[in-house]
Image: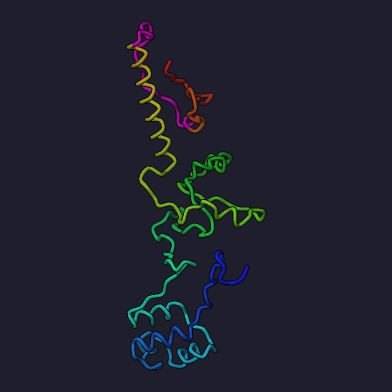
Amino acid sequence: MEPGGPHHRRVPDAFDLCGLLRRIRRRADLSQRELAARIGTSKSAIAAAETGAAGLDARLVAAAAQVADLRIALLDLSGTEVPGMDPDAVRDRGDRRFPAHLDTLLSEQRGSRWEHRPHRPQPTYTFDRRTPRTDPASRAVGRPDDHLRPRPGDAPEERARARRRDQLRSQAAERERRLLAGELRDRPEPFECTCPPRCDQLDDWSGRPVHADDCRCCCDVG
């Protein structure tokens, strides 16, 4: 297809550090020496960057732009500004950011990773790994723009308690329905659930409750 055709996508020009620095100095009406003094570097560093003999730290370029009431930004091929990743996104237990190129998720969505380590605390968040066989193009389809943000109740034990509460409410509603329908006339009064946490880990919530082998409660709506 010839350049300029209906499906032609313009490739952005290379980063023109020389031209940008000169534009900044033009807008701010500063000499190389004056700009260098304003951003905390040497006149020779500015001169080398403007001639293409050397680069310049991105933080210095950003500071130089600010001097001229400008700012450095990322743009996509359509010219739309693309922000940096969310600084308040979830972190691991060491308060480190997760790898930017991987997708974060709640650890319980990959609970099998901790089944063989029952004595190690399960983290709240984890990330999806990838293999060398994974096609980069397929990874990009439908993926979130950013990592998760922490929310109250994300911890595995909190989510387990919430599911148990929902299950007990559902059981109580079902029992009430059956009482009103006359199906439980000879049944004992409702009891309090004493299932151990292991029951919640085994249950997939798709049908009647699943119980651990050592569960003495074994509660059910029936």
Q: Quadrant of the N terminus?
A: bottom right
Q: Say above or below: 220 vs 84.
A: above
Q: Residue at x 41, y 33 (%)?
A: 163
Asked where in the image residue 95 lies, by quadrant, the reply is bottom left
- In the rendered structure, the answer to whether residue 117 lies left or right of residue 124 reads right
Q: Residue at x 59, y 72 (%)?
A: 3
- The answer to whether residue 205 is magenta is no
Q: Position of residue 60 (x, y in %)?
A: 42, 81
Q: Residue at x 58, y 52 (%)?
A: 129
Q: Position of residue 145 (x, y in %)?
A: 46, 56
- In the rendered structure, the answer to whether residue 122 lies left or right of residue 132 reads left
Q: Nearer the viewer, residue 39 or 8?
A: 8
- In the rendered structure, the answer to whether residue 40 lies left or right of residue 213 reads left
Q: Say above or below: 214 vs 107.
A: above
Q: Main secondary structure of the magenta part?
A: loop
For the view shown, which residue lies furthest in the right direction? 133
Q: Nearer the viewer, residue 193 or 139?
A: 139
Q: Position of residue 149 (x, y in %)?
A: 40, 52
Q: Nearer the viewer, residue 117 or 176?
A: 176
Colour mapping:
rainbow
Q: Quadrant of the C terminus?
A: top left
Q: Residue at x 44, y 83 (%)?
A: 20
Q: Say above or below: 200 vs 152.
A: above
Q: Position of residue 179 (x, y in %)?
A: 34, 12
Give the mark count: 0
Asked where in the image residue 41 lies, by quadrant, the reply is bottom left
For the view shown, which residue lies furthest in the top direction? 186
Q: Nearer the viewer, residue 85 or 80?
A: 80
- The answer to whether residue 193 is magenta is yes
Asked where in the image residue 73 lies, by quadrant, the reply is bottom left
Q: Which residues are magenta?
A: 181-200
